[in-house]
Image (cartoon, grey):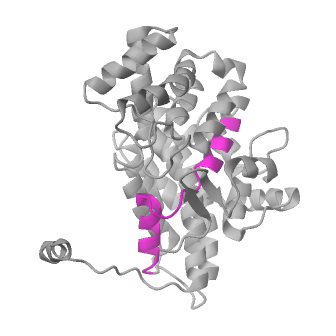
Amino acid sequence: MLWDPSVLDSEEGIRFWGRSIPECQEVLPTAPGGSEMLPEAMFWYLLTGRVPSEAESKQFQEELVERSELPTYVEKVLDSLPKTLHPMTQFVIGFASQYTAGMKKADYWVPALEDSLDCVAKSFTIAARIYNNKYRNGASDMPAIDKSKDLSYNFANQIGFGESEGFVELIRLYNALHTDHEGGNVSAHTAHLVGSALSDPFLSYSAALGGLAGPLHGLANQEVLRFIIGMQKELGDHASEDKIVEFIWKTLNSGQVIPGYGHAVLRKPDPRFMALQQFGVKRKEVAQDPIFKYVDQLYKVAPGVLTEHGKTKNPFPNVDAASGSLLYHYGLKHFEFYTVTFGTSRSMGALAQYVHDRILGLPIERPKSLSMEALKKLVV
């Protein structure tokens, strides 16, 4: 399948239009007073293949924030859902409720772009509304969208973390890092597949979210965090590296894996992990957090143990080894909501490619299926 915005290299990790994550961090604009690249700048870059200027990034940010308001009927749908409903199920419903009647014009890429911008912008507000309905006192007290701020700030503010500069910066970095990871993963491929039938971006991405909700795709950072909390419970807040090594061997010898380590493609530390790990290390309040300390200590000792164990091709950490612990540090402790935050960011990559698919006029995806008998004949 064709996928332009990002390519995953086994040695260097993900590259966005040829640039590595550190290179993107150097050239993409940040928020005023901030130090992390803006997701809006990354989205522009994924759409165009060109680094936006400060002025272009600001204008694009304002355009997206303007689009982030939800129609009243979508708010009513979300507010009517039971609090017991899983937040990812609510997220899918929020997107699907905005579907109208598919593509509107013969010149498909124009409405594709318009709807994709709406879809990305509104995803942050949908996510915030779900959070308030499920974990707080409902959405009636949600702060209004601040049109002078970026999407990440507004999301943080609407879920109660707007005064935490660290959390806002983390969400900016988190969203930018998670935007895209080639097209073969379940959520990206699903958006591409459903979009190839000319379903609009809202339907295409709501289908993608169904895949993201699966335990083999979007739950990894929760598993890592549970593992680290379990280690902390057994070893205390300040364990030596020798004790951590013993804990790792105990886990492996019981037939379990070390979550957050290994990757289907990468053969070196995930540069997304490195960016998040460096974010934590340079912030004193994070670096001293016992949970994050374990993340840092695992990074130092786990690769050696896994190499000695000999059952993994890549003993290095992936992005999930750090992301959950940082969200947890700043107070976002509802594990099942973590996949929703993943879903807001991944919309940018999937829908950037959706627009490219419509520009190129790619055909409907229709792979040939084979019976088991046909497969047997191929190997006999």
Name the quarter where the C terminus is drawn: bottom left
Out of 300 and 358, give the one closest to the viewer: 300
* Residue 303 appears anywhere in the view: yes
Out of 194 and 72, give the one closest to the viewer: 194
Residue 291 screen position, x and y as percent = 52, 20
* Residue 69 appears anywhere in the view: no
**Residue name at image x 55 percent, y 41 percent:** 140
Left/right of residue 34 with respect to residue 322 in the rendered view: right
Quadrant in the picture for residue 376: bottom left
Rendered view: 165 above or below 204 = above
Residue 149 screen position, x and y as percent = 76, 47
- For the stretch drawn in magenta, what is the main secondary structure? helix
Segment tinted magenta in the rendering:
169-197
**Residue name at image x 42 percent, y 47 percent:** 218
Q: Is residue 331 magenta?
A: no
Q: How many marks?
A: 0
Left/right of residue 97 with respect to residue 64 in the rendered view: left
Residue 150 screen position, x and y as percent = 73, 49
Quadrant in the picture for residue 329: top right
Out of 299 and 80, give the one closest to the viewer: 299
**Residue name at image x 67 percent, y 42 percent:** 173
Q: Is residue 188 magenta?
A: yes
Rendered view: 273 above or below 50 = above
Residue 191 screen position, x and y as percent = 46, 67
Left/right of residue 234 with respect to residue 357 in the rendered view: left
| Residue furthest to the left | 373
Rendered view: 319 above or below 363 = above
